[in-house]
Amino acid sequence: MRIGRFHNSWVGSRASARELFEQFRHYYNRQRPHQAVEGKTPIEEVQN
């Protein structure tokens, strides 16, 4: 259902959508602190 809504509202190309998701994945895993791992990013938690 979420994918369908995204598909219906996205006006860019598949390549631009892929790039958007890659940017989000990088942000989520490498820049955004998470409460569940004491304010560290997931990559910091895995590396330590």
Image (tube, rainbow, N blue to C red):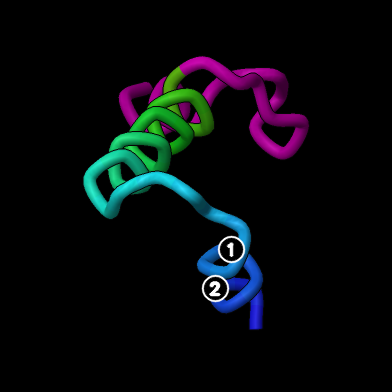
Q: Is residue 16 above or below residue 40?
A: below
Q: Is residue 11 left or right of residue 37?
A: left
Residue 21 x/y as whole percent: 40, 43
Q: Quadrant of the N terminus?
A: bottom right
Q: Position of residue 17 (x, y in %)?
A: 37, 46
Q: Is residue 43 left or right of residue 15?
A: right
The outermost residue toward the left is: 15
Q: Is residue 32 magenta?
A: yes
Between the C-alphas of marks 2 and 1, the distance is 5 Å
Q: Is 2 in front, or is 34?
A: 2
- Assign a secondary structure to mark 1: helix
The local crowd at label 1, few if under 14, some if 14 to 19, many if 20 or more residues have their Cα within 10 Å, is few
Hey, which residue is sitting farthest bottom in the picture? 1
Q: Amino acid at mark 2?
A: Ile
Left/right of residue 25 with respect to residue 10 in the rendered view? left
The residue closer to the viewer here, 3 or 34, is 3
In this picture, which residue range is highlighted in magenta? 31-48
Residue positioned 54% across, 73% down in the render: 3
Q: Position of residue 16 (x, y in %)?
A: 31, 39
Residue hosting label 1 = 6
Q: Is residue 11 above or below residue 43?
A: below
Specify whether residue 43 is painted magenta. yes
Q: Which mark is residue 3?
A: 2
Q: Residue at x 40, y 45 (%)?
A: 12
* Percent x, y of residue 27: 48, 24
Residue 26 circle label: none
Circle 2 Cα neighbour tier, 10 Å, few/some/many (<14 / 14–19 / ≥20): few
At label 1, which amino acid type do we have? Phe
Q: Are marks 2 and 1 in contact (CB under 8 Å)?
A: yes
